[in-house]
């Protein structure tokens, strides 16, 4: 399943009409390697699955307020991960 997901992520990023699509990976318990792979293959944000609805809402609001055009110029793994 993970390999298919990463393959799909790469395919989306190769398509010209989808290259500016915001991709947020929402997961629980992913390995550091999977998180790094999603970063390398073009996801915009990795979000840990929160334990409460309130925390989920808070993190989603933060992600939606990000200026991704600015972020892409300073893209690094530290501003890629949103842990709850």
Image: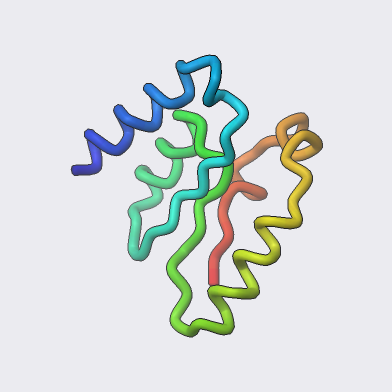
Residue furthest left as drawn: 1
The one nearer the camera, 33 or 51, is 51
Residue 32 point in image, percent of width and height? 40, 50
The one nearer the camera, 4 or 34, is 4
Relative to 11, say whether 48 is above or below.
Answer: below
Residue 58 point in image, percent of width and height? 64, 74
Q: Would you say 12 lies left or right of 21 here?
A: left
Q: Would you say 57 lies left or right of 7 here?
A: right
- Which residue is pictured at 52% across the width and 42% down the height? 23
Residue furthest front as drawn: 17
Residue 63 point in image, percent of width and height? 66, 57
Residue 83 point in image, percent of width and height? 54, 65
- Which residue is pictured at 77% across the width and 30% down the height? 73
Relative to 63, say whether 45 is above or below.
Answer: above
Q: Would you say 83 lies left or right of 35 here?
A: right
Relative to 59, say whether 17 is above or below.
Answer: above
- Could you tell me how many numbered marks the image carries? 0
Which quadrant would residue 60 be assigned to in this image?
bottom right
- Which residue is pictured at 45% across the width and 50% down the height? 25
- Which residue is pictured at 47% across the width and 17% down the height? 15
Quarter of the image that includes the C terminus: bottom right
Quarter of the image that includes the N terminus: top left
Relative to 17, say whether 21 is above or below.
Answer: below
């Amino acid at each position: 399943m993970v390999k298919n997901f990463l393959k799909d992520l790469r395919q989306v990023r190769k398509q010209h009409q989808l290259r500016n699509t915001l991709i947020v990976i929402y997961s629980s318990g992913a390995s550091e390697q999977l998180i790094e792979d999603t970063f390398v293959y073009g996801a915009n944000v990795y979000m840990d699955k929160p334990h409460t609805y309130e925390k989920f809402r808070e993190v989603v609001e933060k992600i939606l307020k990000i200026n991704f055009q600015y972020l892409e110029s300073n893209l690094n793994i530290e501003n890629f991960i949103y842990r709850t």
